[in-house]
Image: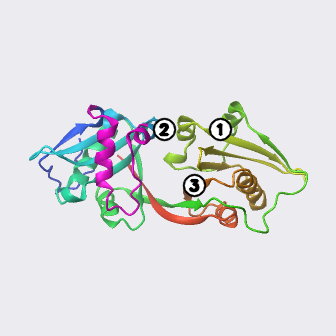
Amino acid sequence: MLDSFTSPEYTPPPQIAMLCSTFDYATLAEIYNQGRIDYIVPMPMNARRLEEYVRAYDVDMAASFVAMDGGDNMPNGLGMLSLRGSRSWITRLGVNPERRRRKTGEFLVHYLLEQAAMRHAPQIQLEVIQDNTPAHNLFVKFGFKETRRLLIIRRPPGKLKTGLFIPPHTQVMSMDSPRIVQCLGQRPDAPSWVEETSSLLNAGGLHGLDVQLADGRSGWIIFQRTAFLMTHFVLSAADDMELASILLTVVHRENPGHDTRVENVPADSPLLGAYFGTGYVEAFSRIEMKLHL
């Protein structure tokens, strides 16, 4: 089944693909963390966070694998597959650095692509951190093509810098859940998998604000807020940077003690000026890649 998209020299190593559904979340989190010890951006997981991740991003545990070494029966690495209709997403791929040079990454990608094909989800996408050359080369080997650069931007807690203000007579109204769903159905952007509407609704904890300016302009902003972090921002004002800046200013004035992380903003997004103008900085970037089987 895989001859059309695996490299001709591919030879399965002596490893066994075990379904993630046969492991508990604590074990999977440990396997994942071992594969990210020396990673450019480690992003550690625990059992609870991994379970939330699986739910939010529609990871199919029966199409995701742990690579078990055929010699000592120890885990070499992990790879997961998410499914939405005819689309699939490879995520959480990692190999224990002490157990590399066994073609584990190639082994896992081989099985994940096979599962995508079997589940009639041939449109496959993923993100690789920029400058992670080994991972990038692995995906190129399987035929993935770069589609765009995505930025992860952050803003630390703290007051807004001088010069940012909310115009007089601006009206700010909180959204209820039906209004949030309605606005997300009208969003003007082309989000990555982790920022898609399905991901946001699965994750929950969404807040939204409708903003009406005295000059007649209006906009909205939706985000996820926990006790200490805000993330998953969606703004309506993609073509009005002044309004976008006001929307961000409203949120940060109301939540000065929150750290903020916005993932996978396209590098050519017109909203970047508004983000950077309200105190955001680039943390790192990813390269989105896609393959059609």
Badge 3 crowding class, 10 Å Cα cut-off, few under 14, some 14 to 19, many 20 or more, is: many
Asked if residue 221 shows in the view, the reply is: yes
Residue that numbered label 2 is attached to: 56
Mark 2 vs 3, N-terminal side: 2
Find out whether residue 23 is within the magenta segment: yes
Q: Nearer the viewer, residue 47 or 235?
A: 47
Q: Badge 1, how many Cα within 10 Å: few under 14, some, many 20+?
A: few
- Local packing at callout 2 (Cα closer than 10 Å; few below 14, some 14-19, many 20+) is some
Extent of the magenta region? 22-51
Q: CA distance from mark 2 to mark 3?
A: 16 Å
- In the drawing, does residue 102 fall left or right of residue 160? left
Q: Which residue is mark 3?
A: 262
Q: Is residue 20 magenta?
A: no
Q: Of helix, strand and loop, which one carries label 1? A: loop
Q: Looking at numbered disc 1 in the image, what kind of residue is underneath it?
A: Gly
Q: Residue furthest left?
A: 71
- First-in-chain label (1 vs 2): 2
Foreground: 59 or 260? 260
Q: Amino acid at mark 2?
A: Ala
Q: Marks 1 and 3, how far apart in space?
A: 20 Å
Is 4 left or right of 189, judged from the image as shown? left
Callout 3 amino acid = Val
Q: Is residue 130 left or right of residue 140?
A: right
Q: Which of labels 1 and 3 is toward the front?
A: 3
x and y, in percent, of residue 83 in the image: 42, 37
- Above or below, comparing residue 47 to residue 191 in the picture: above
Q: Which residue lies under the disc numbered 1?
A: 185
Q: Are marks 1 and 2 in contact (CB under 8 Å)?
A: no
Q: Is residue 4 visible?
A: no
